[in-house]
Image (spheres, rainbow, N blue to C red):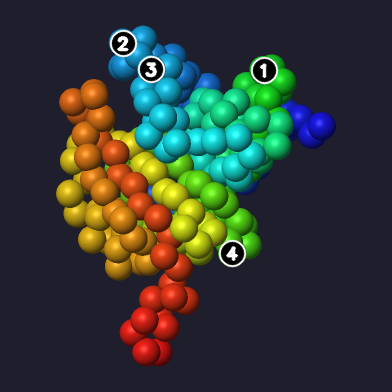
Amino acid sequence: MHHTTTSSAPEAAPATTGRTIRRWARFYDLVVKLLMLGRESAVRNTTIELAQVVPGERVLDVGCGTGTLTIAAKAKVGPTGDVHGIDASPEMIDVAKRKAAQKRVDARFQVGLIEELPFPDDQFDLVLSSFMLHHLPGDLKRRGFAEIDRVLKLGGRFLAVDLGEMRELPAMMEATGFAEVELGKTKYRIISFLKGKAKKNDLRKVEHGS
C-alpha cells in the first residue's frame, strides 16, 4: 500500500492571484479549532455527509489545506477508493503530508492550483472544496469551476462548503458545465453549501449545435 511520505522541504509555490496561507500554516489547525469553538470535526462530518461519499470512489479535495477533510474522505472511500488533495500553499501541503503519515492514511497530497488542476480529464467521481472559494477572485472561481468540470467524470459530483451565502456562484457553475446546481444552508447558520453534477463541456457544445 502506498503511504504518503514527508518531504525534506516544501515545494515551490506556484503563481496565483488567489490568497494562500503560508507563514502560519503550521498553526492553521489550532486557529481553526479556536474559531470553530471545537466544532471542526462536526463540520467536516457534515461536509462528508452532504457529499454522500461512498466506498471505492475517486475523490479530489481542492484547496485541501492541512488535509483534515481529505483524510476524512479517505476513511469513507476505504481501501478501494483513491483520494487526492491539492493546495496552492507548499507549507499547507507539507503539514497535510505529515498528518497523513502520522495517521497512516493513504491520501495523496501535492501543490496545485484550482485554475490549473494537475490531473487528466474525467478522473474523479467527486470533487470537494472546504472554506476555499472565498479566497478566490471572480475570474479564478470561473476558471476553477471549468477545471473541476473537466476532471470530473460525466455525472460526477462537486460540493463546496464556505462562509456566507455564495449567491453569485450557482449561475457561474451552470455557465461552466454543471447541472442540478443547488445552493443551501447547513445546520451551521454562517456556513453554506454549493453542489452540482458535471454535465461536461463537450455535451454542452453538442446541445448548442457547435
On-image quarter of the N terminus: top right
Q: Nearer the viewer, residue 192 or 76?
A: 76
Where is residue 99? Give x, y as percent.
62, 21
| Circle 3 crowding by C-alpha within 10 Å: few under 14, some 14–19, many from 20 | few
**On the picture, is 202 further left or further right than 59?**
left
Rendered image quadrant of residue 175: bottom left
Q: Which one is earlier in the sequence, the residue at label 4 or at label 3?
A: 3
Towards the viewer: 122 or 15: 122
Tag nearer the camera, 4 or 2 = 4
- The residue lying at 68 percent from left, 25 percent from top is 105
Q: Are marks 4 and 2 in contact (CB under 8 Å)?
A: no
Residue 100 at x, y percent in the picture: 65, 24
Q: Which comes sooner in the sequence, label 1 or label 3? A: 3
Alpha-carbon distance for marks 3 and 2? 11 Å
Whether residues under marks 4 and 3 lie with C-beta atoms below 8 angstroms apart, the answer is no
Tell me which label, 3 or 2, sits earlier in the chain: 2
Report the residue at 54% width, 50% height from top: 125
> Local crowd at mark 4 within 10 Å, few (<14), some, or many (≥20)?
some
Disc 3 marks which residue?
42
- Which three-letter amino acid code belongs to the residue tagged 1? Lys
Residues tagged 3 and 2 counted as in contact (Cβ below 8 A): no
Q: Which residue is mark 2?
A: 37
Helix, strand or loop at mark 4: loop
Query: Tags 1 and 3 in contact by the CB under 8 Å rule?
Result: no
